[in-house]
Image (cartoon, coloured by chain):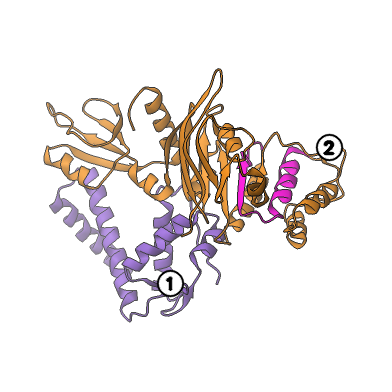
Chain colours: A purple, B orange
């Protein structure tokens, strides 16, 4: 299986998080289908030239999230959960919202102001699309 | 997981102007350890003790189940060692060296050696003296890798290499780990490459180990917190503070015992956390060395 995962040294986030995000995306988009075998931890580490322990951590956390299932000695597969795709979308949405709130707080916006800005953004988007 | 491939316990070696002081190290089989230190920190001495080339004054060294230096003859059959000062014979070709190594080590894998020649873009017929520094390093690496040793010990394998050659060398180190029984220990000053490929990270400075643990836990423990203090507020007591920079109202704190609860502890006393920065291994290494040299406890 072609991993097609890209690690960025200038991303600023830990590498295991980058791997997790890209695997989630592949699953959301259906590139990697439920029940499908994904590269082993060592194969992934060698392909990306990053340490085994980093990939292991990404896989462990993805397993905790229910995205993949690892069977001892048999490698890992994408979880066969019918709602997985929408659950992951939801998770990503949540992440973006948290990020927006964090940046808003850095700018000194109050909670109400952040909500208001979100409404404005929705209205703006609606206008652009019509 | 199997036993440790390499284990040092209280290893000490005294020289007139340098002491390697109670070195404790443990590298589990199947993993790769990056050994980081400034020039003269004790990296090469440690690796030489591991190889039985230098005998420790005190302490215990076990390599692949063999006590060193007593069992070095047996242990060395399973160890591949590459270092700067291990000179190849300049007047002879790489092929001559390959035949020589092959005659000593029955496990020599000729197919793999030829594959490495191709991947490293080397000619077996070329004499060592006509090779560039990068080509010599790659030649020495072929001689070590094609023996398929269970433990590969490399003293600064990438120092002085151009980015392309470095990538090729690191790629081959990683490929060794496809086999879960094989272990790699390499020293380097290049923290970026250590951060990228190592499972275990060890920092050494002035003959002492500063840190030695698995890389993920290690990176997770270190954070830089950028705080904003309201007037007349004091910093809350936080664990593992290695360094405080910035101004009194806008302190920047480096900790090596980060946990998310720290943020709550700050907010509780009215201190707002502007950012929690992940640190690169280079930043951690420098903070850790400075802290040690200033007499701080880690």
In the rendered structure, the answer to whether residue B25 lies left or right of residue B296 reads right
Q: For residue A72, which numbered disc appears in the image?
A: 1
Q: Assign a secondary structure to mark 2.
A: loop
Placement of the C terminus of chain B among the 4 image quadrants: top left
Across and down, in percent, residue B214 comes to: 42, 48
Magenta stretch containing residue B259, yes or no?
no
Mark 2 and mark 1: Cα distance apart in space: 50 Å
In the rendered structure, the answer to whether residue B118 lies left or right of residue B171 reads right
Residue at the spot 18% in from the left edge and 31% down from the top edge? B235
Residue at the spot 76% in from the left edge and 62% down from the top edge? B111
Relative to the observer, which residue lies in front, A74 or B25? B25
Determine the residue located farthest toward the top in the rendered image: B16
Q: Is residue B157 visible?
A: yes
- Magenta residue span: B132-160
Across and down, in percent, residue B113 comes to: 75, 57
* Quadrant in the rendering for residue B129: top right
In the rendered structure, the answer to whether residue B126 lies left or right of residue A84 reads right
Magenta stretch containing residue B159, yes or no?
yes
Across and down, in percent, residue B249 comes to: 21, 28
Residue at the spot 56% in from the left edge and 22% down from the top edge? B15
Relative to the observer, which residue lies in front, B72 or A60? B72
A79 over B29 or under it: above or below: below
A64 over B27 or under it: above or below: below
Q: Chain letter of disc 2?
A: B
Q: Which residue is mark 2?
A: B90
* Quadrant in the rendering for residue B231: top left
Tell me whether marks 2 and 1 sit on the same chain: no
């Amino acid at each position: 299986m072609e991993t097609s995962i890209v690690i960025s040294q200038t991303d600023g986030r830990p590498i295991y998080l980058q791997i997790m995000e890209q695997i989630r995306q592949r699953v959301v988009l259906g590139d990697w289908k439920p029940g499908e075998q994904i590269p082993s931890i060592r194969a992934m580490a060698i392909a990306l030239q990053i340490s085994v322990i980093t990939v292991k951590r990404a896989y462990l956390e993805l397993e905790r999230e229910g995205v993949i299932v690892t069977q001892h000695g048999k490698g890992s597969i994408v979880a066969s959960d019918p709602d997985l795709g929408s659950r992951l979308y939801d998770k990503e949405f949540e992440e973006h919202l948290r990020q927006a709130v964090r940046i808003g707080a850095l700018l000194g916006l109050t909670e109400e102001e952040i909500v208001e800005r979100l409404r404005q953004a929705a209205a703006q988007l609606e206008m652009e699309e019509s | 997981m199997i036993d440790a491939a390499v284990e040092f316990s209280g290893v000490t070696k005294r020289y007139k102007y340098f002491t390697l002081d109670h070195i404790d190290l443990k590298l589990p089989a199947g993993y790769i350890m990056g050994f980081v230190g400034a020039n003269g920190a004790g990296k090469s001495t440690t690796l030489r003790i591991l190889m039985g080339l230098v005998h420790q004054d005190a302490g215990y060294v076990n390599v692949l189940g063999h006590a060193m230096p007593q069992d070095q003859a047996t242990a060395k059959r399973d160890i591949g060692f590459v270092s700067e000062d291990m000179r190849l014979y300049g007047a002879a070709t790489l092929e001559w060296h390959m035949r020589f190594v092959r005659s000593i080590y029955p496990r020599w894998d000729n197919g793999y050696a030829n594959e490495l020649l191709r991947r490293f873009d080397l000619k077996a017929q070329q004499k060592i003296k006509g090779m560039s520094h990068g080509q010599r390093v790659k030649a020495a690496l072929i001689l070590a890798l094609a023996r398929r040793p269970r433990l590969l010990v490399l003293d600064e394998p990438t120092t002085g290499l151009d980015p392309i050659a470095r990538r090729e060398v690191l790629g081959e180190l990683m490929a060794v780990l496809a086999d879960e029984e094989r272990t790699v220990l390499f020293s380097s000053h290049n923290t970026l490459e250590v951060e990228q490929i190592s499972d275990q990270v060890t920092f050494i400075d002035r003959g002492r180990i500063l840190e030695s643990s698995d890389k993920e836990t290690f990176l997770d423990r270190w954070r830089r917190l950028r705080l904003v203090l309201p007037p007349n507020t004091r910093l809350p007591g936080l664990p593992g503070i290695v360094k405080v920079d910035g101004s009194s109202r806008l302190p920047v704190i480096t900790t090596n015992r980060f946990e998310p609860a720290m943020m709550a502890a700050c907010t509780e006393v009215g201190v707002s956390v502007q950012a929690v920065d992940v640190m690169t291994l280079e930043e951690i290494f420098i903070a850790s060395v400075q802290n040690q040299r200033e007499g701080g406890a880690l």
